[in-house]
């Protein structure tokens, strides 16, 4: 029997009276369109989400903060970018910050009236700790990274230095030729710089920081110096006699030696191995007051006799009780 099929929407009518329901072409097209629309919306949402995350990454500001006053030292956005040399950049930054913030202590000093001249705080940046902090992946809850700074003020009060000049703990004297004018002047100038320096318990003394560079504009003169086992002339020749005399007095007092260097050639004003050479910007002589009481550095320069004496003094009661 011949079958004639007529499509009417979703119904097929056969001439024999049989009716079949089949999917509508229109419905299939609708489903396909809706599916494509869902895919488009999902893709668009993903694109927007990714863009938001990228924008979020850029907009989060990570900063280094000085914990002493909560001031922002610098913005770190440039370092948050993924790069092969990121760790190298961070290490370089840490070194630069250490050079900027590290400063030695300048001890307290007494003036001619016995009054305190304030010194300078010692500041140290913990480079290892800062490096660790910077290399850690920052979070949304840590936008500020504090600089790990340690600051120490000179451990001195007016009350603690009462009677500090009364007792000589140790003394050391060296001789020089007063007829050598340039060298004599240099010894006198450097001895005056360290005279009446006061160190509280735990305070440190850095010779180069206190005396400074022995330049012509500060009054220093040309005199013999030892460089690489050879004698030559330079401004400040003779300053090492001051540092060496100080070293022996400090060592006799039992203070803690932090840094010490010897000349490359034997010198005549102290026994072999008892010298303390210095070079501004390089070799230094450093020590710390490891006593439980303040000490005073006193220099006595006698040009006529050709002698330099360095004394370490303290209060009688403090010395007796310790």
Image: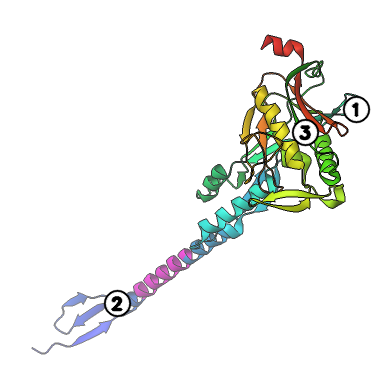
Foreground residue, 249 or 25? 249
For the question of whether residue 94 can be seen, the reply is yes
What residue is drawn where x is 25% and y is 77%?
Answer: 11
State how far apart marks 1 and 3 are (Cα). 26 Å
Q: In which quarter of the image is the C terminus?
A: top right
Q: In this view, does 287 lie above or below 169?
A: below
Q: What residue is disc 2 on? A: 24
* Residue 123 percent coordinates (x, y): 68, 38
What residue is drawn where x is 70% and y is 27%?
Answer: 249
For marks 3 and 2 on the same chain, the one whose residue lies earlier in the sequence: 2
- Single out the residue that lies furthest toward the bottom: 2
Q: What residue is disc 3 on? A: 175
- Single out the residue that lies furthest toward the right: 113
Are there few (<14), some (14-19), or many (20+) residues within 10 Å of tag 2? some
Magenta part of the chain: 30-46
Task: Specify the quadrant of the image occupied by residue 16.
Answer: bottom left
- Dots 1 and 3: beta carbons under 8 Å? no
State how far apart marks 2 and 1 are (Cα). 110 Å
What residue is drawn where x is 59% and y is 41%?
Answer: 126
Q: Is residue 158 above or below residue 207?
A: above
Q: What element carries label 3?
A: strand
Foreground residue, 164 or 190? 190
Task: Specify the quadrant of the image occupied by residue 78.
Answer: bottom right
State how far apart marks 3 and 2 are (Cα). 118 Å
6 lies left or right of 204: left
Of badges 1 and 3, nearer the viewer stands 3
For marks 2 and 1 on the same chain, the one whose residue lies earlier in the sequence: 2
Would you say residue 44 sits in the magenta stretch?
Answer: yes
Q: What residue is disc 1 on? A: 112
* Residue 260 percent coordinates (x, y): 63, 38
Are there few (<14), some (14-19), or many (20+) residues within 10 Å of tag 1? few
What secondary structure do most residues of the magenta stretch adopt?
helix
């Amino acid at each position: 029997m011949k079958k004639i099929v007529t499509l009417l929407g979703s119904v097929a009518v056969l001439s024999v009276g049989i009716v079949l329901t089949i999917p509508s072409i229109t419905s299939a097209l609708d489903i396909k369109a809706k599916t494509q629309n869902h895919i488009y919306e999902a893709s668009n949402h993903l694109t927007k989400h990714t863009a938001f995350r990228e924008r979020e990454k850029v907009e989060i500001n990570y900063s280094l903060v000085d914990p002493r006053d909560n001031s922002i030292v610098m913005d770190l956005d440039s370092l948050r970018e993924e790069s092969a040399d990121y760790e190298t950049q961070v290490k370089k930054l840490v070194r630069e910050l250490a050079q900027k913030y590290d400063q030695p202590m300048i001890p307290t000093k007494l003036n001619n009236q016995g009054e305190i001249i304030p010194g300078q705080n010692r500041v140290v940046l913990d480079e290892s700790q800062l490096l660790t902090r910077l290399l850690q992946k920052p979070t949304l809850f840590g936008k500020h990274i504090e600089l790990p700074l340690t600051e120490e003020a000179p451990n001195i009060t007016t009350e603690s230095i009462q009677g500090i000049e009364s007792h000589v703990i140790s003394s050391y004297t060296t001789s020089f030729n007063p007829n050598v004018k340039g060298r004599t002047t240099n010894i006198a100038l450097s001895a005056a710089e360290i005279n009446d320096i006061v160190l509280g318990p735990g305070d440190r003394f850095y010779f180069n920081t206190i005396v400074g560079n022995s330049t012509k504009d500060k009054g220093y003169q040309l005199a013999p110096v030892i460089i690489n086992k050879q004698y030559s002339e330079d401004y400040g020749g003779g300053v090492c006699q001051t540092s060496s005399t100080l070293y022996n007095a400090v060592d006799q007092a039992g203070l803690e030696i932090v840094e010490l260097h010897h000349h490359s050639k034997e010198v005549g004003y102290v026994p072999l191995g008892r010298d303390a050479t210095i070079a501004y910007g390089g070799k230094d002589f450093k020590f710390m007051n490891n006593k439980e009481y303040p000490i005073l550095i006193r220099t006595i320069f006698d040009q006529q006799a050709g002698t330099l004496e360095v004394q370490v003094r303290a209060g009688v009661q403090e010395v007796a009780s310790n």
